[in-house]
Structures are given as C-alpha cells and as structure tokens.
Image: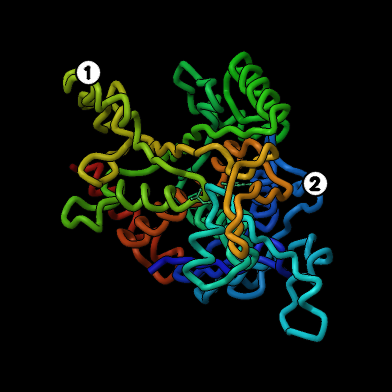
Amino acid sequence: MLRFVTAGESHGQALIAWISGLPAGVPVDLEFIGRELHRRQLGFGRGGRQRIEKDQPDILAGVRHGKTIGAPIAIRIENKDWKNWEKALPVEDSDGAEDAQKRLTAPRPGHADLAGSQKFNFHDARYVLERASARETAARVAAGALAKLLLREFGVTVLSHSIAVGHVRLEREASWEEIAAVCENLESPLRCVDEATQEKMKAEVDRVLRAGDSVGGIFEVVARGIPPGLGSHAQWDEKLDAKLARAVMSIQAVKAVEIGTGVTNAGSCGSEVQDEIAYNAGRKVFERSSNRAGGLEGGITNGQNVIVRGYLKPISTLRRALQTADMKTKETVKAAYERSDVCVVPAGGVAGEAMVAFVLAEAWLEKFAGDSLEETRRNFEGYKQQLENF
Ligand SMILES: Cc1cc2nc3c(=O)[nH]c(=O)nc-3n(C[C@H](O)[C@H](O)[C@H](O)COP(=O)(O)O)c2cc1C
C-alpha cells in the first residue's frame, strides 16, 4: 500500500515527508524533486518568506545508488528561517524561554488558530498555526515528486495551470501543449496559459495587495497518459474521483473540488454534458470528442486526461486585519498579522499536482502491484495487451 505522512512545523527545524510502499528500482532524480519544490515557491503574490529559502530535498532513507530499494523513504526539507525561531520554539524548555515565545492570542479568522487552541487547550495559537500552515505543502510536494517519478516510468505526466485568480477567469480551454509550456516556464508569474488573462490576474493581485486584502482562485490539475481502469465503481471508498477530491480538498485553503467541468455540468442538460464514444479502428482505441467528465466515470479512469480543479478561498491573513476576540482577555481586538502571501493559486496548483500524482500512483500500484518496478511493468504490459485485444 502506497502512503505518505508529513511532520514539521512552519518555523521548526525542518519538514519531513515519509513515503512507504513504492516498489524497488524506481529511478530517483534529486534535481527533479528540487525543481518541484522550487515550483511550489513561485508565483506573483507570494510573501517575503519565499525569498528567504530555496527548498532542497535531503533524502535520509529508502534510496540508494539513485533508485528506491523498497524500504520507507524519508525526505527532509530544511527550514532556513529556523535560525530566527530557535529561541521561540525550542525543543527543550529552559529558564527564561517563556520570554522568547512569540505568542499569538488574537486568533485570525479563517485560520485554525481558535478552533485548534480550544481543541488542544492552548491559550496561545502558536503551536496550532505552526502545524496548520501551508508550509507543510513542501513535504507533500516532495512525496508527490516521488509519485510522479513512478508514473513517469509509464508515460504519465501530471501538470497544472491557473484558471482563475480573484474575479479574473480564463474563458477558454487550455491545450496540453500550452499547459506543458507554462509549467516549463519558471518565470511565468501566475501559470496562466493566456497572456492577456494573466495580465488581468496580475492587476487583480496588485489591487488587493495595495488594499491590504487577499484573493483566492482556481487551479486545474491535468494528468495525461492514464489508462482506463484505475479505481473502482464497486465500493464507495474505492471510487477514484472521491479519493482525488479528498486529497485535493486536504490542501490548505482549498474549499471545493471539481472533477472535469462538474460545476457547469450540474446546470446543463444531459445531452450537453456526456462525452460521446467512438471506436478508432486504426488506433484500436475508444475515443471521445470531449472530456467534460474529467477522465472519470463511475469512479474509474476512462483513458482520457484526468482533470481535477481546486477552488482556493482568499488567503485568511490580512494586512487590513479583521476583528477578533483575544483568547486570554476576551476583548475585541484586531486579528494578529504575520508575514503572508496574498495569492497562492500557482503554488496551490503545484500542491494539487502532488496530491493528484500521489493518488494516481496509489491507484496504479493497487491495480498493477509489484515489489519491483520490473514486476509492476510486467503486470502493466499484460493489462495493456488485454486492452488491445478488448
Ligand atoms: C501554497 C499555500 C500557501 C499559503 N500561504 C498562506 C499565507 O501566507 N497566509 C495565510 O493566511 N494563509 C495561507 N495559506 C492558506 C492557509 O494555510 C489556510 O487557509 C489555513 O491553514 C486554514 O486552513 P483552511 O483554509 O484549509 O481551513 C496558504 C495555502 C497554500 C495552499
């Protein structure tokens, strides 16, 4: 069973991703993982923190001589900001350490600050926000990069682009080539495939930045090269669309998930929505003229691109702070402000890619299994033949 968990606080020593269940023999390209981590840090509207550190993956276990060895993998990503927080968040308590604590008693609406403090019985939201922070997505991206490396062996690629920032929306479909190009271009400010729309998106970010406000938006993750037959209709918890929705919804600030054009589909007639089927005798494959279903029918992949959209709420930390109640004095005060992003749509997309890649890799190994990459490949080739003879 493929799985991963993460550990680490936003300003602690490091983040850790622990990944278990990858077959032995998967080539691990450190440069690729580093590039993925870097992509997560980019985007117009990010806060000062991204300038402090360039994330680097440090693999502690499970990879030897450039390949996975079938053992659990541990990846460490150092927090360069730790040196500024060592006194505030020491592992061991000591005399006078209390004075250095950076307490946060004015909980920020939209964050885990208040609910988390009540849950764990802290009268200071520091420990809660340290772990709730989306800095944790760096560890997810590292785990997702390993999933991508497995999928890459079978010709599967997972990419993303931004389709809305605040009120500005991409009003046309993006081709795979356009998405690939905008992912390749690390200078792209908001990873939108349409230049004119991207300029409007930038203006939207500038507008809220000046106003001390923030924006949300929509990212779209697209996976290409997925065969029909991953996931299952047979049980509610085996449905791949549901697994993808859960994984993307778990990303900080994602408040809705859409498969294909599911939201528009809900307001359309059946004849306008379903993707009609034809058989291409030359290529010996079933084809569709459209992909509104986002590559999933009945919880099973249908051979089309898998498309998952994540809807991000606007960033909660506002320079023009909202009203809150102090957790100690109970008085009405302004919510605390800590250095913050104002737009994270492209970064959310990279986290989305990681989560989608991981769920697809999990489904891949459920179907094709194998303790070694060779064994997985043999099983996959057998299935490919079955599809060809279908
Ligand atoms: C890549 C990324 C970066 C984020 N950066 C910030 C940030 O700088 N400031 C902030 O208030 N929220 C940020 N968020 C969102 C918060 O982490 C999130 O809203 C908060 O933890 C509460 O969780 P919830 O919105 O999922 O309920 C970010 C989210 C993502 C995906």
Residue at 40% in and 40% down:
256
Query: Residue type at mark 2?
Result: Arg
Residue 105's place in the image compared with 60, above or below, is: above
Q: Is residue 41 visible?
A: yes
**Mark 1 crowdedness (10 Å alpha carbons): few <14, some 14-19, many ≥20:** few
In the picture, measured across the screen, residue 224 lies left or right of residue 382, that is right
Q: Is residue 142 visible?
A: no
Q: Is there CB contact under 8 Å for labels 1 and 2?
A: no
Number of marks present in the image shown? 2
The answer as to whether callout 1 falls within 8 Å of ligand 1 is no
User: Judging from the image, what secondary structure is the residue with disc 1 in?
Assistant: helix
- In this rendering, which labeled residue sits more in front, label 1 or label 2? 2
- In this orientation, which residue lies closer to the viewer: 19 or 268? 268
Extreme-top residue of the structure: 196
Quarter of the figure with the N terminus = bottom left
Residue at 64% in and 54% down:
33
Label 1 – label 2 distance at C-alpha: 47 Å
User: Judging from the image, what secondary structure is the residue with disc 2 in?
Assistant: helix
Residue 203 image point, x, y percent: 67, 20
Q: Which mark is residue 51?
A: 2
Mark closer to the chain start, 1 or 2: 2
Quarter of the figure with the C terminus = top left
Residue 334 image point, x, y percent: 65, 46
Give the labeled residue for mark 1: 272
- In this orientation, which residue lies closer to the viewer: 255 or 97? 97
Query: Residue type at mark 1?
Result: Glu
Residue 375 image point, x, y percent: 39, 66
User: To which quarter of the image does residue 41 belong?
Assistant: top right
**Mark 2 crowdedness (10 Å alpha carbons): few <14, some 14-19, many ≥20:** few
Residue at 49% in and 28% down:
176
- In this orientation, which residue lies closer to the viewer: 33 or 169? 169
